[in-house]
Amino acid sequence: MTAEIAIWRDGPVQILRIARPEKKNALTGAMYGTLADAIEAGDADDTIAAHILTGSGGVFTAGNDIGDFLATARGTGGLDENVVRFIRLLPVVKKPLIAAVDGNAIGIGTTLLFHCDLVYAAPDATFATPFLDLGVVPEAASSLLMPARMGYTRAFAMLALGDPLSADDALAAGFVNAIVPASDLEATALAAAKRLSAKPPEALAVARRLMRGDPEIILARMDEEVAAFRERLRSPEAVEAFTAFFEKRPPNFRKPV
């Protein structure tokens, strides 16, 4: 449990707010663990019908805490098991998962959205997956799900070139349902969650399972990505990328000619 994840209920809806504004809502291992605990508890609670995930302070999340990655790259830490636990939970969440995205959604902040049933974004939302810029690889099965949803060329531009998407771009790419004013964002997500809560729960569960497909395929890709991610985190490229980030300079991945 961590105070940087706020958890409360509004009737049959569980709301999870990422609240670490001083670090732009960057996620630590403890925060991943709290999110996973809450989703698992909500899935096991018959009085909860849906989960909403949102940010705070005009930011969804800046992604994984870079300090954690740098510690791993330098050999003083490891890829927190709570990170893997949260990622592997996404394709098997039993209740509808709804995201309300305001401001930046970086890294996992974007890739988790491909596991959400509904995504609402504020007009200033920005989506980016700069994994290669950090010397690592895509995660959360984004290497599988993004090309399937967006087409290969658009997914490659996002995952390899690191091109960000605006809210309008994300709507056109098919992973945002609607763009709504920031002031109405959470209310829109909550209204959708309460509409779902009025549906027959068993029929809804079956419909979700049929539409989402076989989770084992997604989990298998996640495991491939995690293995590659762990290896890349300790690579010279990742060490250089994270060091350059903290030193506020461009990274140099090429040896002098």
Image (cartoon, rainbow, N blue to C red):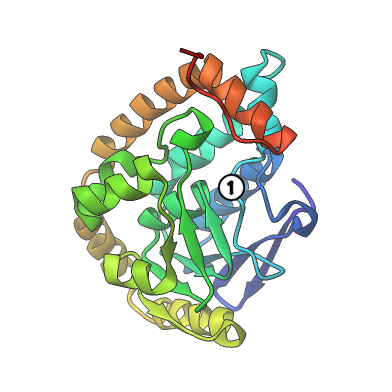
Up-down relation of residue 165 to residue 66 (above or below): below
x%, y% of residue 83?
56, 35
Rendering coords of residue 59 (x, y %)? 64, 64
Rendered residue at 52%/77% (across/down): 122
Q: Residue furthest front?
A: 257
Q: Is residue 14 left or right of residue 163?
A: right
- Report the side of 199 relative to 210 (left or right): right
Give how far across and how far down residue 48 sits, in percent.
Answer: 53, 67
- Expressed as whole percent of the image width and height from the top left, the position of residue 16 reads 62, 62
Give the side of residue 48 with respect to residue 166, left or right: right
Disc tally is 1
Closer to the camera in the image, 239 or 28: 239
| Residue picked out by circle 1 | 63
Quadrant position of residue 66: top right
Q: Residue at x 53, y 86 (%)?
A: 181
Amino acid type, callout 1: Gly
User: Alpha-carbon neighbours of circle 1 within 10 Å: few (<14), some, or many (≥20)?
Assistant: many
Q: Secondary structure at mark 1?
A: loop
Q: Is residue 71 above or below residue 121?
A: above
Q: 245 and 120: which one is in front?
A: 245
Report the residue at 66% width, 46% height from top. Answer: 34
Q: Quadrant of the N terminus?
A: top right
Considering only vertical position in the picture, is 235 above or below 88? Answer: above
In this view, the residue in front, 161 or 138, is 161
